[in-house]
Image: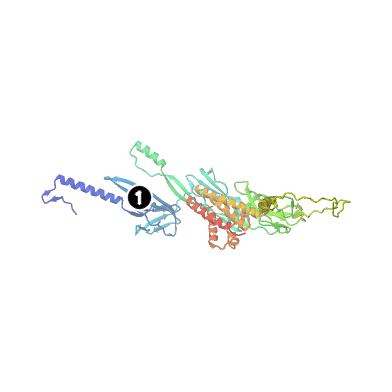
């Protein structure tokens, strides 16, 4: 529509009228700007609409000057991995024409990683704001063939040999060679048929490959094969952020402008999240030979020496004897078991306990110490039987048996009461009644003055009560000492008391680890407390407590299905923490409170 000059019925507007009209128009524009600044908004933005395979981008769902009823949910899209990163909030305030305007933005961020090439459609996201439903625009992500970053970073897996025996422990190294990386995550290793544990802290060094000098970061693991056959280690995947200098061209306007812009470019970097994968490593796991396998073999693989002590060896029938058996060497110390004592029929036996002390960072060598309490049933026992321990040595590929000769014992009978002594008359002494005196005693001729006699103390109740006090104190001391003796001779009662103190102090430490965001120490301590408490109730070694024990042995004694599910959830959380630890204090505190309730309920179970 063409513009025409404004005229009144009297002609062209005066200069003052034009000034008034301009001021009003500016005021209207400021009001519109203020209204726009405080208007609500809802949209979704992709940081990159085109992306090479193997890299990630950020999706932001933004709310301007409004709050959603809930966090938006992204649908599952085939070929995309979507991870929620959490919310962020920003505020911007300004003064226009004397009035304050605000711009408050709430963003929910998602990391999107494509797994294949192609074009992906992110449908509109619905959200409810102040009772009304809103939708974002449809977004498209084009994924091209992945870039080759092998010249900047690559990973390699090393194992000492290509074949091992079932149960044999060996070390494995995952090495990262990089030029411009900054580590934020650990490598992810498939564990089919293998038990893998991280050993020690990662090491850093430099290594020259060809003409290029790389920074080398090495993670070491102890690995034990639990399934025979052809196994494949890997491919190991590792998400590594790479940083590149921003080389975007800019127009230079002068010498000083060129200098300062050049310095800014040196500090400007571009991040690329790259998923590196190693070549798979083939591993042959051989079964243990049947030929030459000893009768008492219980699956130990490695090379060990044995030391055995017993104390006391001079005792009374019914007193406990503590056996201490130390196995030192190289192998899977966690899976070692104490030999069975099937032929010890003359002894009452209690379950053994064990501790492990490693002598190397890899956890392949060390000493596992067992303690077992046995009680001789009678005084005819002259010695402890011979003890044998068998293992398979993968180096010599043969079975070996360690033996300890019988240990002599001196067992005295348990005399519960002594016989009454017999008193014999002396030689020549008569056993007849004593002679009666024959002297005459005169009768008192006068009665004398009569007086009322006081009641003797012996017949007064208070005196009798005072005399019984020492007896009661003496009996109480005897009963207390007897009870203490029974507890000292009952290893299970001693274990119950020790485990109770351990759980009480451990729950306090869990709270400290949660406050310090130390998830690794938190879940390690939680797993130990569960093992100790369940092992005490089931009268089993703590290191033998697993999820399978909870399902088989403990489930039969617990009628509350919720408690069984809570226990299984805690075990699964501890296992998952090795690969995806949670560092949020709120989550750790919630798990700690739940563990306290579960441990208290287990403590209340009957023996």
Q: Secondary structure at mark 1?
A: strand
Q: Position of residue 353 (x, y in %)?
A: 65, 53
Q: Residue at x 33, y 49 (%)?
A: 103
Examine the rendering and report whether any part of residue 176 can be seen.
Answer: yes
Q: Residue at x 11, y 49 (%)?
A: 11
The C terminus lies in which quarter of the figure?
Answer: bottom right
Q: Residues within 10 Å of mark 1 (few under 14, many from 20)?
A: some
The N terminus lies in which quarter of the figure?
Answer: bottom left
| Left or right of 307 in this view: 120 | left
Residue located farthest toward the top when viewing the structure as drawn: 256
Q: Position of residue 22 (x, y in %)?
A: 20, 47
Q: Quadrant of residue 339?
A: bottom right
Check the image and report above or below for 209 versus 536.
above
Q: Position of residue 145 (x, y in %)?
A: 44, 54
Examine the rendering and report whether any part of residue 324 can be seen.
Answer: no
Q: Which residue is mark 1?
A: 104
Residue in the foreground of this view, choosing between 541 and 193: 541
Residue located farthest toward the left when viewing the structure as drawn: 10
Q: Position of residue 445 (x, y in %)?
A: 79, 50
């Amino acid at each position: 529509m063409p513009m025409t000059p404004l005229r009144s019925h009297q002609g062209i507007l005066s200069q003052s009228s034009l000034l008034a009209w301009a001021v009003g128009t500016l005021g209207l524009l400021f009001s519109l700007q203020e209204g726009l600044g405080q208007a609500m908004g809802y949209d979704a933005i992709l940081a990159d609409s085109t992306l090479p395979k193997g890299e990630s981008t950020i999706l932001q769902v933004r709310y301007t000057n409004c709050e959603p009823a809930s966090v938006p949910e992204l649908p599952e899209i085939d070929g995309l991995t979507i991870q929620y990163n959490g919310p962020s909030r920003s505020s911007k305030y300004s003064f226009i024409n004397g009035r304050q305007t605000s711009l408050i933005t709430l963003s929910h961020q998602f990391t999107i990683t494509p797994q294949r090439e192609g074009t992906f459609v992110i449908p509109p996201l619905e959200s409810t704001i102040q009772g009304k439903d809103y939708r974002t625009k449809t977004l498209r992500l084009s994924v091209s063939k992945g870039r080759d970053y092998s010249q900047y970073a690559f990973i390699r897996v090393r194992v000492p040999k290509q074949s091992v025996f079932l149960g044999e422990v060996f070390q494995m190294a995952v090495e990262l060679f990089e030029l411009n990386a900054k580590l934020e995550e650990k490598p992810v290793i498939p564990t089919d048929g293998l038990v893998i544990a991280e050993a020690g802290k990662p090491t850093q060094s430099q290594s020259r490959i060809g003409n290029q000098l790389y920074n080398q970061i090495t993670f070491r693991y102890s690995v034990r094969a639990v399934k025979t056959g052809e196994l494949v280690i890997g491919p190991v995947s590792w998400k590594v952020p790479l940083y590149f200098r921003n080389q975007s061209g800019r127009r230079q306007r002068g010498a000083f402008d060129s200098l300062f812009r050049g310095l800014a470019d040196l500090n400007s970097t571009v991040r690329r999240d790259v998923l590196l994968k190693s070549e798979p490593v083939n591993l042959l796991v051989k079964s243990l030979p049947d030929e030459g396998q000893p009768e008492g073999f219980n699956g130990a693989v490695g090379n060990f020496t044995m030391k055995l002590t017993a104390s006391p060896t001079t005792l009374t029938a019914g007193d406990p004897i503590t056996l201490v058996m130390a196995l030192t060497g190289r192998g899977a110390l966690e899976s070692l078991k104490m030999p069975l004592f099937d032929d010890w029929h003359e002894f009452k036996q209690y379950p053994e306990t064990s501790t492990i002390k490693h002598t190397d960072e890899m956890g392949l060598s060390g000493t596992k110490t067992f303690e077992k309490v046995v009680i001789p049933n009678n005084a005819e026992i002259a010695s402890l039987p011979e003890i044998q321990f068998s293992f398979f040595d993968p180096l010599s590929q043969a079975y070996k048996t360690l033996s300890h000769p019988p240990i002599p014992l001196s067992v005295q009978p348990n005399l519960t009461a002594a016989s009454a002594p017999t008193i014999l008359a002396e030689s020549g002494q008569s056993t007849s009644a004593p002679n009666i005196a024959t002297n005459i005693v005169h009768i008192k001729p006068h009665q004398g003055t009569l007086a009322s006699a006081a009641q003797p103390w012996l017949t007064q109740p208070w005196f009798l009560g005072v005399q019984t006090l020492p007896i009661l104190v003496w009996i109480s001391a005897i009963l207390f000492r007897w009870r203490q003796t029974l507890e000292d001779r009952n290893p299970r009662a001693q274990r119950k008391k020790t485990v109770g103190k351990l759980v009480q102090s451990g729950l306090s430490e869990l709270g400290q680890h949660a406050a310090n965001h130390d998830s690794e120490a938190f879940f390690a301590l939680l797993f130990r407390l569960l093992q100790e408490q369940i092992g005490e109730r089931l009268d089993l070694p703590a290191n033998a407590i697993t999820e399978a024990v909870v399902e088989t042995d403990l489930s039969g004694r617990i009628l509350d299905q919720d408690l069984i599910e809570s226990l299984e959830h805690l075990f699964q959380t501890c296992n998952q923490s090795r690969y995806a630890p949670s560092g949020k204090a709120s989550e750790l505190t919630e798990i700690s409170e739940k563990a306290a309730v579960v441990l208290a309920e287990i403590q209340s179970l009957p023996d």
